Image (cartoon, rainbow, N blue to C red):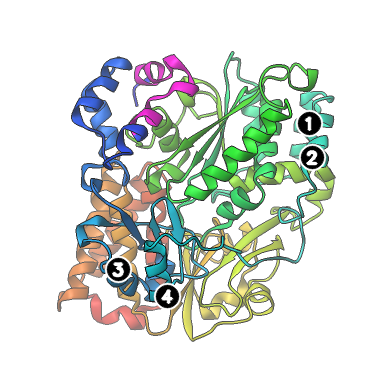
Amino acid sequence: MSKNLSELSGKKGISDNLFEKLGIAAKESGTPTSERLEELAQEFLIGKANTYGAASFYDFMKPENKGKKAYVCNGSACVCAGTQEKVQEELEKYLQPEEIGHITCLGRCHENGAFQFQDKNYSAKSNEEIKEIFSGKNFEEDTYNVKATKEVLTASYEGFEKHYEVIKNILKQDSKEVLEEIKKSNVRGRGGAGFPMGFKWEACRNEESNEKFIICNADEGDPGAYSDRYLLEKRPHAVLAGMMIAGYCTHANWGVLYIRAEYPESVTIIQNAIDELREHNLLGKNINESGFDFDFKIIEAKGAYICGEETALINSIEGQRPEVRTRPPYPTQQGLFNRPTIVNNVETLAAAYSILKNGGESYNNLGTEKSSGTKLVCLDSFFNNPGVYEVEMGTPLMTVINDLGGGFKKEIKALHIGGPLGGIVPKEKFENLAIDFESFAKEGFLLGHAGIVSIPENFPMIQYLEHLFDFAAYESCGKCFPCRLGTKRAHEMLQKTVQSDYKISRKLFNDLLNTLEQGSLCAHGGGIPLPAKNALQYFGDELEGFFN
């Protein structure tokens, strides 16, 4: 992406940014008018093609979104549960079909039947309850069914004063010493890649700049994962405190929360928590007379899975089309508005607060040598006890399945773990895995976000693969041709064999997967071959009739 566009987008600062104005312009009808796009192009001194190119990318701004009043979840967990056709049918009693769009995913994987109406999410609602929703009745908030074998992230909130006493004490310390405590913990990013957080923070700290940013990547888009939603809505101050710690360690002065449009309740809750911080004079200039300046800004995303990738997210905030950037330079060197930037996901930042509260060594003593601490694991509705579970890293997967999840309600043949780009794990491999990075890598899978989607015995694997590549093609940013073309061609082949007697060339399909894996710029195209290869390896007999 153009460095000049980044500079132009940032000329008014994060408080008055182009992407937010595009979202406001789309609010009334579902898409910005051509006149408004031209006005914004002139205001930010960029071309109209840039504003149109950005707005037309997102689910909640593209012209096709105009007039939509409700959205039905089409995430993998809801698809496997088979609940969504009935939801669609029920909504069509109150809305025209063209007024109903799709959405992926609403983070209601433990209940299914998920949909969004009037900026509020619902799941597992009966026909009568849906009728009441359209008549204006409010329903109780989600309970998440949260349990823990080791409470760190799920530890009880002790109240504002006690919670932020930790931050006040940190601000009395040298920021380098605080960073060393983070490094002692050996915490790795919880968003998928497992990159050491301390190393990333140190790289940003070492960059000279009068402005730096901490971005909380709350664009949790993996079907099966809703742990970030839990933290944003039930532990908002742990997330905000973690961002303040990151800012203090790296000399950043802005914390930006990029929150999914699919999680409207999260935006309200986080804003209320920020307001509470402001009321207690813990934001702004010279916080607690420490010399530390820091403030928050919420950016409401507009529906694009690729924005979970850190450079696409940065482009999104700048109001550019959210395409992946080539690296180097890395965001820690040249990120938002070309300034040094840290991008961490919600769970990673929430962990920072726990680390500083209890000490880096204490955190490092949890888990395994290479995977320290705890992990939030999300179980879908096929488990007898679905919900969010916090477990110590290294906990056997079978313990999660049986002791915590209570086993399955019906026969399943595989678990898709770690989102669409994660591995498809057959039943015979469950005993070989533990909740850590190393065992998953050793067995040829990916822990990722640790969201778990159950694939039932009666769900055809070829149909699941077709669903995955439909998702991958739709969500590709289009920057690199291996992903832009490869995901689409794979979906076309799979769709054709599902709908007819067409047989896919195994050699051609393998070549396509290898091209995606080796030629894509980011993990979207590079990661989607993993579940396909797992399926071909472990479900070859079932898939044999579809390939030649």
- Classed neighbour count for the residue bearing mark 3: other residues with Cα under 10 Å, few (<14), some (14–19), many (≥20): many
* Res. 126 mark: 4
State the SS at label 4: loop
Mark 2 touches mark 1? (CB < 8 Å): yes
Q: Which residues are magenta?
A: 4-22
Q: Amino acid at mark 4?
A: Ser
Mark 1 touches mark 4? (CB < 8 Å): no
Residue drawn at (69%, 54%), measured in percent from left and top?
Answer: 371
Residues at marks 1 and 4, CA–CA distance in whole angstroms: 51 Å
Residues at marks 1 and 3, CA–CA distance in whole angstroms: 51 Å
Which quadrant would the C terminus be assigned to in this image?
bottom left
State the SS at label 1: helix
* Res. 88 mark: 3
Tell me if I can see residue 515 in this picture.
no
State the SS at label 3: helix
Which quadrant would the N terminus be assigned to in this image?
top left
Q: Hey, which quadrant is residue 533 in on the image?
A: bottom left
Residues at marks 3 and 4, CA–CA distance in whole angstroms: 12 Å
Q: Position of residue 204 (x, y in %)?
A: 61, 26
Q: Which residue is mark 2?
A: 356
**Is residue 72 placed above or below 162 in the rendered structure?**
below
